[in-house]
Image: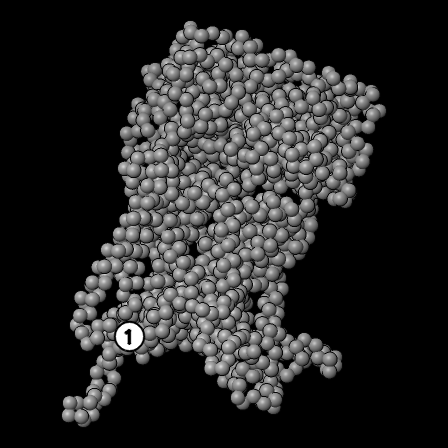
């Protein structure tokens, strides 16, 4: 994969978030309360199962966030390297067969023939041309079978069996490793450590993590074994592999879910804390600001803003070098617009909490030392509202992912050329009316979106329970 | 009546045998009450005494089977009027609640439903009556609970009532089912002393009138002395001593009980170090195997470590769970215990500081507050204009010299905390002056104020809210040094570290605590950290805002000792804001009594507490229940409650409640009358 | 009480003005009218004359805020801001791209929107509150646990799935009701049934869970313990004490959205072909009809502010502390 490295804006933000997460982890380790809260998250079995699933999504998303422009074969006579206009990602490189093996149009999952009959000319033995209406053979789906299409079931079965065996073996090896590691670090016998993992008596919810990993292996191994030579989830209208689309959608969903909150977090924190701490006219002004923004119904504000952004982008084509860049800026703009409509909620909560905190005696103690206001905010108030920020971050994620699908359907979502769950649904929803039904695109998009959102919701619950002192105290 | 049958048949109304109650946390159950035995006869008042976290409230809730969801009754036997409560199905238990036994709670503010009228909340305890009859009965009950104008109150919502009235409503609702037993869980802890006295009188009267048994849960020895016929002392989930009232107060036998008495501050121990109990109550998860008090007991011997003591009868109706009572170890009568617990006379700083009197007025006082006023505007109406003001502080004058302690005493809402904060300029005063060593603080810019801030510091009431949970102890103490540029002796990090270590040692903590976080410390230890934080900038004056009111008696004694020692060592001046007269008596040199934003009487401790002249001071002192048998105060009760500082009464603020008030009192606020060089009273009846 | 309402009303005015300024900035400052004209006319047909004509037709050829050429009041009135934004306060929204009067269109489309939104709202509220009460009554039991799990699963499903799945299952496979469309009169129920059902079902997850949390929070309070100590039955406590207090946060969250029901639901209406305000908005977005979108933003905000007023009033009705305080 020779090429020129390209850093899209959203890539930069995604990696920034990844680094920020690492830093937060390091800071948490030093702060006993935060560390304790995260340990409570680690003990939560649904939470850890959800985190495992999310981690799988994040790995896919991160692989899709390293972009480059591939090197083209140099034109005759010129020695300067020429790079393609098309921007590819690491994921594209790994999933090259998925990306490039396009059929003509719809085909069902694992099919060897197209979904619709086509008229083709067949030369008979006697040399005459005859028009035949039949399901044409796919160019790539099951092509390795050659003429022997009946062998498909056996082939699929064999591949699934082999991949499951391999996957489970790998999983078992991991299980043994974890057991041994636990036995070593806690100075237990191997039998005792395996019993503890099984019964969930460990400080970290190993049993649910391992079980979830097993489940992921059960799903992923056959998919990987088959996707090279079949279209496991079929193909869409223009013949693109649906499995590939699903993989690409993950990054879009992650960007929408994470970058949105990230871009608006500083705003919400700054305004919320200053309004609550200084009160008076500062508070009045900030309250007016967010009440006004809040009073425009979200969808309409987004619609208006996106429309205007479209005009802006369309009338200035010269700003963008590649289509990917344009789609990327549009995605970020969408994140920003979504964030503009959602920061008010967090801001209000932070303001309320700051109003309470500023009356606490430790803040007054700092004031009695003449500590500067901004320093009091940074040292005494901010750390004590961080748990609310973390909770808001994880709680918003799932609703944003869901919102993306709806907005893309309405036509005010991501760029139509950008693959996302929303565009996938939007492109094929009318096909449900066909006979027989084209269901696979929708089913794949909904299933993966459900898995992502459910995992995010479960993790959000675990995080909220662990960080919300009131809940932690009562249960 | 049934009650009489029980009394004559000598069958106790309530009998508890080996009650064990715990809380499920994850896979384990923590035992909060570990084997409670008690009997209560009909018409008797039994006080269950203990410090916070000893399990007394949990025990009370177990009796009514009202434990929170995680609570479990693990074993034992509960008998009420001959019925086994733990075997009753929930339906019958429900029928018993409210009718057989009723309960009132500590927080009247949250214990009433905010959106239902008072009448409804009482009437719903009378399901057998029709609506009209129920209302009539509810009004009767309110009247019985001492509420004037009950018919009007029936229509009101809890938020329209004061704290004392809410507790009366709670009592009225509890009386609705004509219960034989009233379980009162700290019924007066959230109330002011004058209101506490009213409520205790009411409970005592109702008990006598109705022959009702009362199980009184409290931490206050004074309340016990006022109310109880018999007393049980709880420690760490166990009952350790049980005695009739007289025996309890004259000859307590358990070392813990003896220590509780010795830790009480009062006049007799003035100028002495108070007895303290070393260490803290063990956590539920790590209870000692033998006697639970052994790790903190100075008389403990080998057997105490291994074997949990059994009940010993030491007098008629007086039993104790202590190996010492077996005749092993050193037996200590109450008096000997008090003497041996280190009540050595220590010179009170009073004796080393310059004698008060004439020369005191010549030298500039360290702190001089003149006509200080803090008004909070009340905004109302269409444009939120200020239509009036809450006169939280309304012309307060004080002066305090180096090395002395001035106690500012008053009930909640009188504005005493606001005075403290206004002196530190944490709240901008509306008027008046605050002079520190002759320099005016009011109106000074923040920058100009900063160098003066290191000379005056504050210790707050709630040790759990006054330390930032996210900072380490070292960071907390270092904050002031950093902000005010106090880098002790050695410059830089190493010097500061050493200075913080020294401070921690000074307040009696291990210097290794520097890198730990507040949540790892108990309330008393946190208050020590807060004191170290204030000391870090080497102040000359510390404003102490109720520094011990959130602490248990034994811990309070530790903090009071520490404050006294620091004053002697560093020559600090304290402005001590409190509502607790015992504490005032113990450590203050001068006293100022506040009522509704103004000081009504001030003078030396001997003058004000020994010979109070203002009727309010007299009533306040009379309302304090004394933890002694002999000295039950003359029943002088203040009627009514403190009016709102938004609409203080005309003339003397105190006249609506004052027994001596006449027409002249309504006319104008009385000027201060000097009774001696130091004693001033604002009362027309005192001149 | 009257002063309280008046003050609230007065407070709403600056917000409405703020909304107006924001929308104006969005529509006219981010992009110049020239850009919009170019966009609308398509890249090919763009000539300076065509742009000028397009602008003149809509009155976009004036200066934004200050008309230095006009005199007197014309200085501020003969501007885009005044002609386009200020007139919205009196309900004049101008014409859509297709030449129709937007205000007329809005009044005729309100009916169908309400016909779907109102039943969805009322039914949804009843269903979710009942379910939440049920879960709260059986708290800490298996029913509660699995109920919450089901709620989390339900709220993780995309709203699009409910609509697409519902249409596919009920209309296409079972052929119970028509897939989409709208009719007046007695037959209307046939068209309303499915969208209302789907609207209710898609809201169950999150609302039930939220109400349950509120109920549980109330159940943990001291006054509930007092009620138990009086010997009241658990159902009495739940309905007389808990529900009444929990209604305060629930109502205030719910009342705010009542006026917005007029706006209809974008998704439901466009999927079911209901000629309401929701589908009007979607069509306008797809056709890039700025005038309509702007009008809808303004109406939406105005309704939201009415909702805020309702919230304040309902607070006062439910909570005696506010009723008597002001």
Name the secondary structure under disc 1. loop
Q: Chain of mark 1?
A: A
Q: Is residue C109 above or below residue B584?
A: below
Q: Is residue B635 above or below residue A395?
A: above
Q: Position of residue C185 (x, y in %)?
A: 35, 76
Q: Nearer the viewer, residue C292 or B338?
A: B338
The way the protein has been coloured in the rendering is one colour
Q: Position of residue B478 (x, y in %)?
A: 64, 36
- Identify which residue is drawn at 32% across, 45% down: A177
- Identify which residue is drawn at 29% across, 48% down: A173
- Give the number of callouts: 1
Q: Residue furthest top?
A: B327
Q: Position of residue B102 (x, y in %)?
A: 41, 30
Q: Nearer the viewer, residue B380 or C34?
A: C34
Would residue A319 be visible to someone looking at this image?
yes
Image quadrant where one finds the N terminus of chain C:
bottom right
Crowd around label 1: few <14 · some 14–19 · many ≥20 (10 Å):
some
Q: Nearer the viewer, residue A472 or A314?
A: A314
Q: Is residue C116 above or below residue B104?
A: below
Q: Give residue B135's quadrant in the image.
A: top left
Q: Nearer the viewer, residue A411 or C103?
A: A411
Q: Position of residue B55 (x, y in %)?
A: 43, 27
Q: Is residue A458 above or below residue B569?
A: below
Tell me if A357 is positioned left or right of C194 in this view: right
Q: Residue furthest right?
A: B362
Tell me if A472 is positioned left or right of B478 in this view: left
- Identify which residue is drawn at 51% across, 53% down: A20
The residue beneath circle 1 is A140
Q: Residue furthest left?
A: A126
């Amino acid at each position: 994969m020779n090429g020129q490295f390209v850093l899209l804006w959203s890539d930069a933000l995604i990696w920034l978030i990844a680094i920020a997460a690492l830093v937060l982890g390091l800071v948490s380790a030093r702060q006993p309360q935060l560390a304790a809260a995260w340990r409570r998250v680690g003990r939560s079995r649904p939470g850890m199962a959800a985190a495992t699933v999310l981690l799988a999504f994040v790995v896919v998303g991160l692989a899709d966030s390293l972009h480059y422009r591939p090197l083209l074969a140099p034109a005759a006579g010129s020695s300067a390297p020429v790079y393609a206009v098309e921007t590819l990602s690491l994921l594209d490189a790994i999933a090259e067969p998925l990306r490039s093996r396009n059929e003509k149009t719809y085909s069902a999952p694992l099919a060897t023939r197209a979904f619709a009959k086509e008229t083709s000319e067949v030369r008979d033995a006697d040399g005459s041309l005859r028009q035949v209406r039949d399901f044409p053979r796919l160019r790539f789906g099951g092509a390795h079978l050659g003429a022997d299409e009946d062998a498909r079931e056996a082939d699929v079965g064999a591949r699934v069996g082999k991949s499951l065996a391999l996957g489970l073996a790998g999983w078992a090896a991991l299980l043994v490793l974890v057991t041994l590691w636990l036995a070593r670090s806690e100075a237990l016998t191997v039998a005792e450590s395996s019993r503890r993992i099984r019964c969930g008596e460990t400080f970290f919810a190993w049993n649910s993590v391992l079980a979830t990993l097993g489940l992921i292996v059960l799903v992923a191994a056959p998919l990987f074994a088959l996707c090279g030579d079949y279209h496991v989830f079929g193909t869409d209208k223009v013949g693109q592999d649906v499995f590939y689309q699903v993989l690409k959608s993950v990054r879009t969903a992650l960007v929408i879910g994470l970058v949105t909150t990230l871009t608006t977090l500083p705003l919400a924190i700054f305004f919320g804390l200053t309004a609550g701490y200084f009160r008076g006219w500062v508070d009045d002004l900030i309250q007016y600001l967010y009440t006004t923004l809040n009073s425009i119904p979200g969808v309409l504000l987004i619609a208006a803003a996106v429309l205007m952004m479209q005009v802006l982008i369309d009338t200035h084509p010269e700003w963008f070098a590649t289509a990917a860049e344009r789609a990327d800026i549009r995605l970020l703009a969408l994140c920003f617009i979504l964030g503009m409509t959602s920061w008010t909620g967090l801001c209000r909560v932070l303001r309320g909490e700051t109003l309470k905190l500023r009356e606490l005696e430790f803040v007054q103690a700092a004031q009695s030392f003449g500590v500067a206001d901004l320093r009091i905010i940074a040292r005494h108030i901010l750390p004590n509202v961080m748990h609310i920020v973390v909770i808001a971050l994880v709680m918003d994620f799932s609703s944003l992912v869901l919102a993306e699908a709806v907005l893309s359907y309405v036509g005010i979502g991501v760029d139509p050329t950008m693959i996302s769950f929303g565009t996938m649904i939007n492109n094929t929803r009318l096909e449900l009316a066909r006979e027989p039904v084209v269901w696979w695109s929708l089913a794949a998009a909904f299933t993966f979106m459900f898995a992502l959102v459910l995992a995010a919701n479960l993790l959000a619950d675990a995080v909220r329970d662990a960080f919300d002192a009131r809940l932690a105290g009562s249960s | 009546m049934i009650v009489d049958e029980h009394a004559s048949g000598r069958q106790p109304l309530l009998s508890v045998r080996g009650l064990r109650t715990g809380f499920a946390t994850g896979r384990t159950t923590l035992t909060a009450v570990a084997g409670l035995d008690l009997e209560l006869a009909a018409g008797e008042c039994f006080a269950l005494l203990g410090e916070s976290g000893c399990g007394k409230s949990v025990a009370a809730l177990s009796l009514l089977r009202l434990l929170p969801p995680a609570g479990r009754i693990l074993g034992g036997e509960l008998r009420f009027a001959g019925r086994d409560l733990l075997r009753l199905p929930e339906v019958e238990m429900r029928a018993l609640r409210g009718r057989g036994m009723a309960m009132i709670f500590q927080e009247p503010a949250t214990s009433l439903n905010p959106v239902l009228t008072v009448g409804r909340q009482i009437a719903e305890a009378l399901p057998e009556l029709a609506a009209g009859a129920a209302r009539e009965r509810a009004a009767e009950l309110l009247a019985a609970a001492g509420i004037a104008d009950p018919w009007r109150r029936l229509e009101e919502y809890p938020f329209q009532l004061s704290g004392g009235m809410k507790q009366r409503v709670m009592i009225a609702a509890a009386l609705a089912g004509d219960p034989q037993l009233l379980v009162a869980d700290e019924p007066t802890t959230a109330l002011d002393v004058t209101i506490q006295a009213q409520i205790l009188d009411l409970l005592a009267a109702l008990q006598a009138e109705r022959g009702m048994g009362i199980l009184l849960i409290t931490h206050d020895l004074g309340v016990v002395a006022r109310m109880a016929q018999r007393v049980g002392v709880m420690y760490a989930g166990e009952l350790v001593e049980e005695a009739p009232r007289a025996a309890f107060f004259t000859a307590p036998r358990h070392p813990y009980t003896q220590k509780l008495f010795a830790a009480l501050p009062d006049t007799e121990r003035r100028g002495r170090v108070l007895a303290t109990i070393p260490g803290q109550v063990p956590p539920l998860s790590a209870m000692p195997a033998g006697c639970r008090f052994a790790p903190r007991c100075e008389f403990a011997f080998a057997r105490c470590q291994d074997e949990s003591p059994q009940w010993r009868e030491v007098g008629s109706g007086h039993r104790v769970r202590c190996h010492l009572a077996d005749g092993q170890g050193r037996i200590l009568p109450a008096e000997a215990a008090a003497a041996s617990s280190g009540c050595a006379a220590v010179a009170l700083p009073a004796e080393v500081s310059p004698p008060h009197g004439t020369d005191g007025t010549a030298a500039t006082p360290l702190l001089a507050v003149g006509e200080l006023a803090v008004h909070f505007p009340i905004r109302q109406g269409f444009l939120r204009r200020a239509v009036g003001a809450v006169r939280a502080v309304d012309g307060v004058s004080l002066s305090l010299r180096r090395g002395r302690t001035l106690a500012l005493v008053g009930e909640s809402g009188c504005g005493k905390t606001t005075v403290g904060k206004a002196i530190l300029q944490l709240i901008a005063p509306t008027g008046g002056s605050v002079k520190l060593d002759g320099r005016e603080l009011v109106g000074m810019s923040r920058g100009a104020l900063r160098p003066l801030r290191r000379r005056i510091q504050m210790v707050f009431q709630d040790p759990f809210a006054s330390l930032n949970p996210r900072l380490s102890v070292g960071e907390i103490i270092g904050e002031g040094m950093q902000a005010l540029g106090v880098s002790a002796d050695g410059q830089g990090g190493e010097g500061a570290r050493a200075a913080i270590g020294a401070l921690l040692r000074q307040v009696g903590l291990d210097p290794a605590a520097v890198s730990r976080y507040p949540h790892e410390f108990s309330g008393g230890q946190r208050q020590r950290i807060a004191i170290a934080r204030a000391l870090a900038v080497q102040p000359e004056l510390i404003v102490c805002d109720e520094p011990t009111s959130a602490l248990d008696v034994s811990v309070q004694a530790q903090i009071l000792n520490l404050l006294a020692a620091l004053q002697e060592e560093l020559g600090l001046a304290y402005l001590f804001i409190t509502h607790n007269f015992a504490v005032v008596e113990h450590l203050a040199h001068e006293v100022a009594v506040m009522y509704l934003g103004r000081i009504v009487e001030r003078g030396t401790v001997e003058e004000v507490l020994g010979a109070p002249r203002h009727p309010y001071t007299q009533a306040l002192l009379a309302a304090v229940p004394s933890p002694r048998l002999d000295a039950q105060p003359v029943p002088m009760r203040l009627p009514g409650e403190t009016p709102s500082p938004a609409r203080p009464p005309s003339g003397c603020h105190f006249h609506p409640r004052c027994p001596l008030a006449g027409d002249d009192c309504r006319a104008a606020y009385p000027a201060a009358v000097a009774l001696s060089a130091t004693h001033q009273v604002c009362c027309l009846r005192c001149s | 009480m009257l002063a309280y309402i008046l003050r609230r009303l007065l407070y709403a005015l600056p917000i409405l003005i703020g909304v107006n300024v924001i929308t104006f900035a969005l529509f006219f400052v981010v992009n110049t009218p020239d850009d919009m004209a170019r966009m609308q006319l398509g890249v090919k047909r763009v000539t300076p004359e065509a742009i000028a004509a397009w602008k003149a037709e809509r009155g976009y050829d004036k200066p934004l805020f200050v008309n230095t050429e006009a005199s007197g009041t014309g200085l501020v009135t003969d501007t885009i801001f005044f002609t386009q934004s200020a007139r919205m306060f009196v309900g004049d929204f101008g014409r859509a791209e297709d030449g129709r009067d937007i205000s007329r269109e809005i009044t005729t489309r309100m009916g169908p929107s309400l016909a779907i939104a109102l039943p969805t709202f009322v039914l949804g509220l009843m269903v979710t509150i009942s379910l939440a009460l049920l879960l709260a009554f059986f708290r800490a039991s298996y029913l509660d646990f699995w109920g919450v799990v089901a709620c989390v699963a339900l709220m993780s499903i995309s709203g699009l799935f409910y609509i697409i799945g519902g249409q596919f299952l009920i209309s296409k496979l079972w052929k119970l009701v028509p897939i989409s469309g709208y009719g007046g009169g007695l037959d209307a129920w046939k068209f309303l049934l499915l969208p209302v059902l789907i609207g209710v079902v898609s809201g169950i997850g999150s609302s039930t869970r939220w109400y349950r949390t509120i109920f549980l929070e109330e159940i943990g309070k001291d006054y509930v313990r007092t009620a138990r100590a009086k010997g009241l039955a658990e159902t009495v406590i739940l309905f007389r004490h808990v529900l009444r207090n929990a209604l305060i946060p629930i109502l205030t969250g719910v009342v705010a959205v009542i006026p917005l029901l007029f706006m209809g639901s974008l998704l439901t209406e466009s999927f079911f072909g209901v000629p309401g305000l929701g589908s009007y908005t979607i069509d306008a977005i797809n056709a890039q009809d700025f005038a309509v979108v702007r009008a809808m933003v303004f109406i939406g905000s105005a309704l939201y502010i009415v909702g805020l007023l309702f919230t304040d009033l309902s607070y006062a009705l439910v909570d005696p502390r506010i009723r008597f305080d002001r």
